[in-house]
Amino acid sequence: FSSLFRKLHGEKSMENDGEHFASTAWLLAPPYNCRSNGEVLGDFDVLSLCDTAAQWYADATEREQLKLEDKLQKFVKDYRRVVFLGVSMGGFAALSNSHLASSVLVFGPQTDLTISHLRPGFDPEHLSRLYENLRKNVRAAVSSGVQFQYHVGIEEHLAYARRLPLPRSSIFIHPIEGRIARLLERVGILWPLLVRTLAQEQRIARGAVPADSL
């Protein structure tokens, strides 16, 4: 783990790693723990990020410079298929970097930080730039064939979804209110959904099905 931490943050950052706003984990998912509705997953790597400073994985002059996009670009080039998954603030990060992925799954993400009731304490102009950057990268991702699943309940996040340049077929509206990922997990929907998506990505990576079959 320490070698991966150094690769992401540099040698100097190891001196005060408790001050870092991004935590990282690298693990191998065993196939025998990844079964659902007949789908069996092969091994895959997981990079887990947590922005504990609540700056929405974004850089700001007065805050930590995470340089997330630059770091992700270095990692994704080594993989045939890449899935970005995010909830709420993590969904904002997944959408903001969607042009680097093969597929993107988000659950109730914040998008327009200028109006969201949850947002980082940046000045209004910076929040507006972050939203426009998200829209730009989503537009580029759609143009390059990135597949999206935008899961949202019947609440304010639905209004955010409709303002993005996403195909309507990529927006999944659930008749619920609240923390959508947690609610979908409770009723047994979340895990099969994730396994089905990852299994399809693995089939594409093996060349078993075409990339436009998602």
Image (spheres, rainbow, N blue to C red):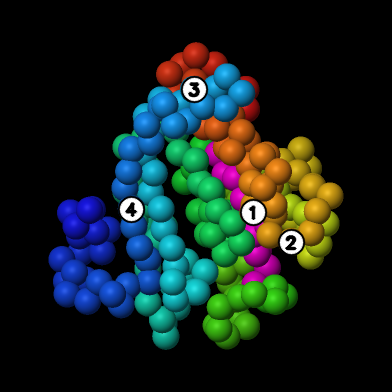
Identify the element where label 1 is drawn. helix
Between residue 4 and residue 31, name the one nearer to us. 31
| Disc 3 from disc 1: Cα separation | 23 Å
Circle 3 residue: 40
Which is nearer the N-term, disc 4 or disc 1?
A: 4
User: What's the mark number on residue 182?
Assistant: 1
Amino acid type of the residue tagged 4 in the rendering:
Ala
Circle 4 residue: 25
Amino acid type of the residue tagged 3 in the rendering:
Val
Which is nearer the N-term, disc 3 or disc 4?
A: 4
Identify the element where label 4 is drawn. strand
| Disc 4 from disc 2: Cα separation | 28 Å
| Disc 1 from disc 2: Cα separation | 9 Å
Residue located at (84% from left, 49% from top): 175
* Left or right, residue 106 beside residue 177: left
Label 2 CA crowd tier, 10 Å (few <14, some 14–19, many 20+): few
Amino acid type of the residue tagged 2 in the rendering:
Gly
Residue 110 in sight from this viewpoint: yes
Q: Is residue 144 positioned above or below 207 on the image?
A: below
| Disc 3 from disc 4: Cα separation | 23 Å
Amino acid type of the residue tagged 1 in the rendering:
Arg
Asked whether disc 3 touches disc 1, contact meaning CB atoms under 8 Å apart, the reply is: no
Residue 110 drawn in magenta: yes
Between residue 96 and residue 157, name the one nearer to us. 157
Circle 2 residue: 178
Which is nearer the N-term, disc 4 or disc 2?
A: 4
Q: Residues in magenta?
A: 103-113
Asked whether disc 1 touches disc 2, contact meaning CB atoms under 8 Å apart, the reply is: yes
